[in-house]
Image: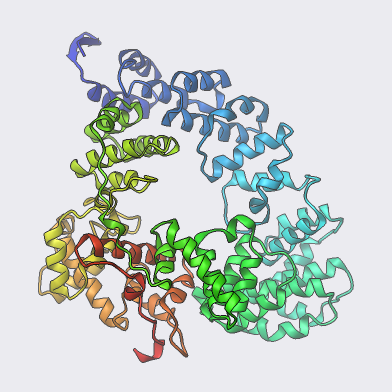
Amino acid sequence: MGLITLGCLPIAHAAEEQFNEAIKFANSGNTAQLEYYRSAMQNDALGYYPEYWMLNNNLGFQPATNIISFAQRYPQSAMAEKLAADYVEEKVKQADFKTAQPVLPYVTNPDQAESCAVAQVRAKNGDTLVYAEYKDVWLTTESQPESCNGLGRLMLSSPLLTTTDRQQRLYAQLRAGQSGPAIATAQTLGLNLSLAQLNQIQADPLNYLWSATKGTTVDYAYLVFALGRAADADLNTALQNLPRVVQGVPADVQKYMYRTVAYIGGTTVMKNNFNPEVLKNFDYSYGVPFTPEEAEIYARQAIRFGEWESVLRAIDSMSVTQKQEDRWQYWMARAYENRKDQASKQAAKSIYQRLAAAGDDYHNLLAKDHLGIRYNEAHDRAQPSAQDIQRLDQDIHFRRAFALRNINASATYTNREWNWAVRQAYLKQDDGLLLAAAKRATEMGWYDRAIYAAERTLKRHNYAYRYATPHQNLVVTHSKNAGIDPSWAYGLMRQESRFVTTARSHVGAGGLMQIMPATAKDVARKMGETYNPAALSDPNTNIRYGTYYLSMIQGMLSNSPVLATAGYNAGLTRARRWQPEFKSIAADQYTESIPLHETRDYVKKVMTNAAHYGVLLGQGPQAIESRMPPIPVRNTQ
């Protein structure tokens, strides 16, 4: 770029230097200097950033025309989409739904909070279909963004929601102890709940249950509230009192009462452990509608105890979209397989065949195992053509991502541009461009983004890019020295850090294998070494400590890779506590019933990764279940 003048001094600027200077002014809110950079950078790949920062500086007070103008001049770009989505959120906070309306077409990839903000704008501008699309938001009692809570409040006035819908929401809110929202929902049903009475019940729910009247719909609402509070305080006592409490109550209300205690038992496994009485109460509650969340908790409880008819009932209670997910199709097949009749066994086989042909993720690989098919597809090594590489150089979205990477810009910007570029290529089903991006990122050592791109090809795949093998000599050597499978170590490392050596978690874990400082100190002591915190950023030390620790906890957890993987993520004590008490269970049942979503997902992904790495490391065709032996009872430790 030639010489430009800043103040009185002529300075030679590269686009990269301009970006780094401009962002300093953006962070300090200096819009006058940003206007200068907006002009100076207008022909650069990163040239839209100064204007983005200027608009974002006072976003809620911009006219919609400014946002639309930016989106139209930088069509289908990462920051135009983000600007539009953030603008809609701001306008919803201001209750200015009319101004936000024309911006909606430019919000094309919203997160949950943005999606609920968009839905509020649609609803306020007369789109009643919103209420059918966002029923999950209406029914959930879990923590969610304020824009979703606001959408739920809007839905209270929708004529499309039935009395049953409202009753379901009311009982869920009462169960969760959400007094204020429950009172508002009750009013739409013509019920007047007393906040004073709810507070009194909250103070002593068991005492209320002993003396409660059971004659009106309001009485039933108080009963559900009291049961929820009692179960949350002492699950076993609530379970013991439930048969007496439901007496004299209409059958449909009884089912909601059973659901209340079952739901709380199913969501407090971390505190109360697994209890077969919880599953029985889910069974008793069958017949009134399940929320998506309730149906999944019911299914996991049934899976844990191998109650296959209950598994089928739980899946039958799910939404159409939910029950078509690979995981629930797999468990439907497992349940059918455990029936004695041939028709059910054939139905199971058909589902396994469909899953086996559909992909190579966790449930697809499990399905292959049930059909006796060994996995060997990781040999696919499709390469981009010269034309694909040329198109990569010309693609503005990838150009922005690479430009940001080259100047070590914040990952907030770099990853956003990269992920957006990948999404655009994926939407166009452009495997060639995705492979070209993955190839270049791999060559740069930018493994996490290479994986992100390579995972999204549809027909042409390169598993060497999807399952990168950096530091291979270190991984293989240290794994063998620790007595563990290097493909498993790679599988865990890929999930932990995506091979970013400087990765740091919110709890302080660091490096390739995300080792906690306290763990590293313990490992160093056991290995007879002096602990050095800086050494964890060194791949050699990090892999050596990580493989040693993985081997150590495997030995402490029945030599089970599944238990050790769970323990690596959630802690040894938790992994052991989740083991069965009376008889061993299949590893897939243990994994699906892990009460922490993060750990449940983690174990599935690590074991899947390990199967892929097994092929890439020359271990031959893989069966994922060979890595997942049955989980023994806890008291054999």
Q: Is residue 75 left or right of residue 96?
A: left
Q: Residue at x 60, y 75 (%)?
A: 343
Q: What is the residue that sits farthest to the right in this orientation? A: 215
Q: Is residue 191 above or below residue 373?
A: above
Which percent across, then down, holds residue 47? Answer: 34, 20
Nearer the observer, 327 or 101: 327
Q: Quadrant of residue 579?
A: bottom left
Q: Residue at x 23, y 44 (%)?
A: 446
Which percent across, then down, holds residue 509? Answer: 28, 59
Q: Quadrant of residue 88?
A: top right
Which percent across, then down, holds residue 441? Answer: 24, 41
Q: Is residue 145 above or below residue 61?
A: below
Q: Is residue 363 left or right of residue 511?
A: right
Q: Residue at x 45, y 83 (%)?
A: 585
Question: Can the viewer see residue 115 in this picture?
Answer: yes
Number of numbered callouts drawn? 0
Q: Residue at x 73, y 73 (%)?
A: 257
Q: Is residue 527 left or right of residue 164?
A: left
Q: Is residue 371 above or below residue 76?
A: below
Q: What quarter of the picture does the N terminus occupy?
A: top left
Q: What quarter of the picture does the C terminus occupy?
A: bottom left
Nearer the observer, 338 or 74: 338
